[in-house]
Image: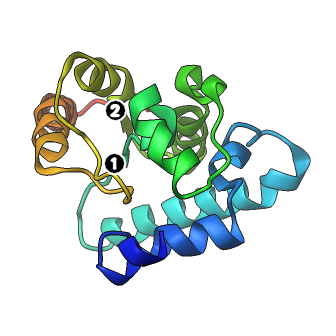
Amino acid sequence: MRRKFDEGRVNPFSVLLGLQQPDMFEKVMHWREPEMQPYFRYMVQYLSDIKAAAAKHNAKTAAVSIPHGAFLTAGTQAPLRDQLLLTITPEMLEAEAPDAVLREACGEAGMPCIVVTEAFRARAEAGEERFYYPLDTHFTPLAHRVFAELLAPEIARLVEVEKAGRQPAG
């Protein structure tokens, strides 16, 4: 790992995360637990603040759930668990928690929420190419393209709802 880090092939944040908060993604699975509620409340407040700031400029907002490799496929989990030493479990592959927490926070903040995780996961599982860099948690160019393809119709739907003067569904 040290050699890969020295060669610039590992995101420094990923190393820091592995050292200081290896269970961060596992904690998402338990977002309804009392000890996680302060973080949830922060999320609602931040979303509310963003919405209020945008409204001052007559802008509209929506939150987008960005699929993370910890919750996507066994292949995207492996380097996070085996090389970055993050707490990653097979149950995370079926988890709706990352999307559920954002949906609920958006609902409380009155902000539309866009989720394309299932379709993104299906595309990742069907493909031969990587969606994430091996020792990094960022999308590859392919994943960016697929995410944009899935996201664009959802944004278009929100625009149409706004044009029609209806309240977008969270």
Compare residues 19 and 21 and report the one nearer the observer: 19
- Residue 11 vertical placement versus 39 (above, below): below
Q: Residues within 10 Å of mark 1 (few under 14, many from 20)?
A: some
Q: Residue 15 location, x and y as percent? A: 53, 71
Q: Is residue 138 left or right of residue 80?
A: left
The three-letter amino acid code for the residue at tag 2 is: Pro
| Gap in angstroms between the C-alphas marked 1 and 2 | 10 Å
Labelled pair 1, 2 in contact (Cβ < 8 Å)? yes
Q: Residue 118 location, x and y as percent? A: 37, 21
Q: Residue 160 location, x and y as percent? A: 13, 31
Q: Is residue 163 left or right of residue 18?
A: left
Rendering quarter of residue 46? bottom right
Q: Is residue 6 visible?
A: yes
Residue located 13% across and 28% down the image: 153
Q: Which residue is mark 1?
A: 62
Q: Which residue is mark 2?
A: 168
The residue furthest bottom is 6
